[in-house]
Image: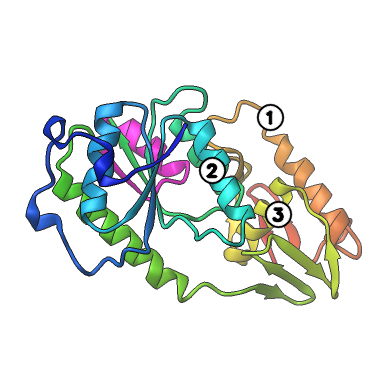
């Protein structure tokens, strides 16, 4: 269920009022945050705190609704993008880790801040490995939450100014924001996993990747299939990109180690 919150929507007496020191004018009201949290009291407290900071806040209580809302935003040219996602892990239907993994595999680079009662080192590592940018454990202070939100949005703004519109190597051009690939001027149709593999390779030219590393980055650390799926996808990419797949120029096998690009 999606709720676009307004300050008059909840009785202030039932919530912890955000301290006055959290009110910063440096964050323009146009920044939008999506809160994905199924515990009503926590969700409402976070929402009201962020509104005091001047953010426009949307909130849902389930991972499936979060993915649907973000898809709706991406398809509507009249909608502004979400600048930050605050994401709980323990959610009904689709959990937070799966939401994070799905967004990253789909090419969505929106900053993600995980908020979770699970505070073990392994839980944090897992959250960051599947694509989250930061992790904070419950209970947390609203002051710390606001500071992390400001820092993540600020970093995203700086990074956004430096994103290359395309990556090029010889006759191969990849457009990350458009999920599009051209080979010798002709558009090449790639499946999502093929595109993510190629994008990863082109982001780190000449680096050698083992099958295990590629599985972790593209399929996720909890992938239960055979590592030979990497070989299959590499073969498919070669058939689409290489003039002679048996003598590859782009996706090269490094015997005993893995694969590299270029």
- Foreground mark, 3 or 2? 2
Residue 247 vertical position relative to residue 210 in the rendered view, above or below: below
Give the structural element (helix, strand or loop) at label 3: helix
Q: Are marks 1 and 3 in contact (CB under 8 Å)?
A: no
- The percent coordinates of residue 79 (x first, y second) are 54, 58
Inter-mark Cα distance, 2 to 1: 33 Å
Give the structural element (helix, strand or loop) at label 2: helix
- Foreground mark, 1 or 3? 3
- Foreground mark, 2 or 1? 2
Q: Residues within 10 Å of mark 2 (few under 14, many from 20)?
A: some
Q: Quadrant of residue 56?
A: bottom left
Q: Earlier in the sequence, mark 3 or mark 2?
A: 2
Q: Residue at x 27, y 61 (%)?
A: 151
- The percent coordinates of residue 21 (x first, y second) are 8, 57
Find disc 3 in the rendering and name its residue.
195
Note whether residue 4 is visible: yes
Q: Earlier in the sequence, mark 1 or mark 3?
A: 3
Q: Residue at x 61, y 74 (%)?
A: 165
Find disc 1 in the rendering and name its residue.
226
Residue 188 vertical position relative to residue 98 in the rendered view, above or below: below
Q: Earlier in the sequence, mark 2 or mark 1?
A: 2
Residue 152 vertical position relative to residue 120 in the rendered view, above or below: below
Q: Residues within 10 Å of mark 1 (few under 14, many from 20)?
A: few
- The percent coordinates of residue 245 (x first, y second) are 88, 57
- The percent coordinates of residue 60 (x first, y second) are 43, 35
Q: Residues within 10 Å of mark 3 (few under 14, many from 20)?
A: many
Q: Which mark is residue 126?
A: none
């Amino acid at each position: 269920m999606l709720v676009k919150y307004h300050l008059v929507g909840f009785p202030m007496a039932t919530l912890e009022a955000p301290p006055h020191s959290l009110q910063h004018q440096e964050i323009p009201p146009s920044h939008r945050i999506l809160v994905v949290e199924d515990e009503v009291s926590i969700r409402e407290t976070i929402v009201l705190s962020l509104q005091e900071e001047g953010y426009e806040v949307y909130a849902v209580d389930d991972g499936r609704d979060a993915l649907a809302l973000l898809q709706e935003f991406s398809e509507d040219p009249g909608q502004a993008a979400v600048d930050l996602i605050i994401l709980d892990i323990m959610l009904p239907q689709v959990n937070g880790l799966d939401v994070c993994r799905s967004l990253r595999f789909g090419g969505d680079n929106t900053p993600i801040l995980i908020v979770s009662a699970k505070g073990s080192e392994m839980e944090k590592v897992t959250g960051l490995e599947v694509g989250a940018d930061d992790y904070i454990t419950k209970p947390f202070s609203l002051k710390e939450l606001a500071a992390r939100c400001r820092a993540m949005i600020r970093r995203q703004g700086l990074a956004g100014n430096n994103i290359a519109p395309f990556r090029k190597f010889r006759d191969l051009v990849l457009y990350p924001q458009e999920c599009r690939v051209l080979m010798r001027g002709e558009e090449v149709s790639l499946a999502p996993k093929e595109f993510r593999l190629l994008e990863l390779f082109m982001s780190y030219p000449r680096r050698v990747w083992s099958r295990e590393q590629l599985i972790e980055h593209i399929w996720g650390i909890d992938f239960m299939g055979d590592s030979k799926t990497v070989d299959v996808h590499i073969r498919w990419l070669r058939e689409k990109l290489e003039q002679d797949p048996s003598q590859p120029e782009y996706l090269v096998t490094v015997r005993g180690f893995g694969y590299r690009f270029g």
